[in-house]
Image (cartoon, grey):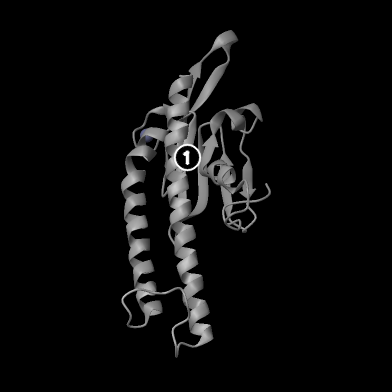
Amino acid sequence: MKGGYRSRAGRPGWHAKTVSALRIDIRKLHREGYLSGSYNLTWRWGNGATLGVITSPKSITLNYRYRYRESEWQDVNQSVALNRTPCHYGKDRPWFVCPSCNKRVAILYIEKNPLCRKCSGLVYPSQSEDAIGRSWYRTRKIESKLAAGAETWNYYRPKGMRHRTYERLLAVRLAEEQYRDRAFVAQAWREFLESFTKCLS
Ligand SMILES: [Zn+2]
């Protein structure tokens, strides 16, 4: 898979890729025959991040690193049970069992843990608001350094500040801004997908 999560900001199309990186659909695994035996699958994105999936007829195991703050990662290794319901012509249809609410779902969202849409919607907004709030706090601290004693920063390098220090502060400030954009866009997408799936069902 090309592109990915850490594409440069402003590059068209990265929003959609972020979303595709966030969810895993059991219908796709089933259609491609991966649930009839045991397979070791890996999705790889442009930045080298991977999602590992080990399949079997009764459960799958997800392996990934989840970034829940700007520079903090968590390794996730979670097994998800599968459940099957009969459908036409004696065939059956597989479902994920959401690790949190134990309900049958077709799609899991790759969060701090893999979760169904409902459970993910319950945990995401507050986490996201907290994360955005902390990012604003860090940004204000950087801007007060850039203001160098004045009340507000005038968007120029303060007298006496070394070029390298100034460049570094600008880069960190920009990274915080991009981080807030991603958190905001991810949340907006989640709400959009939720209303969209409601229309379909
Ligand atoms: Zn759930």
- Name the residue furthest bottom: 160
Q: Which residue is drawn at 53% across and 13% down?
A: 87
Residue 31 versus residue 110: which sits nearer the camera? 110
Residue 128: x %, y % from top left: 36, 50
In this rendering, the answer to whether 131 lies above or below 103 is below
Residue 29 versus residue 161: which sits nearer the camera? 161
Residue 22: x %, y % from top left: 51, 43
The answer to whether any part of residue 186 appears in the image is yes
In this rendering, the answer to whether 167 lies above or below 22 is below
- Within 10 Å of disc 1 (Cα), the crowding (few <14, some 14-19, many 20+) is some
* 8 left or right of 121 in image: right
The amino acid marked with disc number 1 is: Trp
- Name the residue furthest front: 154
Q: Quadrant of ligand 1?
A: top left
Q: In which quarter of the view is residue 101 placed?
A: top left
Q: Which residue is drawn at 42% across and 36% down?
A: 191
Name the residue tied to disc 1. 189
Q: Residue at x 48, y 20 (%)?
A: 200
Residue 85 versus residue 111: which sits nearer the camera? 111
Residue 159 versus residue 187: which sits nearer the camera? 159
Q: In which quarter of the view is residue 136 placed?
A: bottom left
Residue 182: x %, y % from top left: 48, 52
The answer to whether any part of residue 71 appears in the image is no
Is label 1 in a helix, a strand or a loop? helix
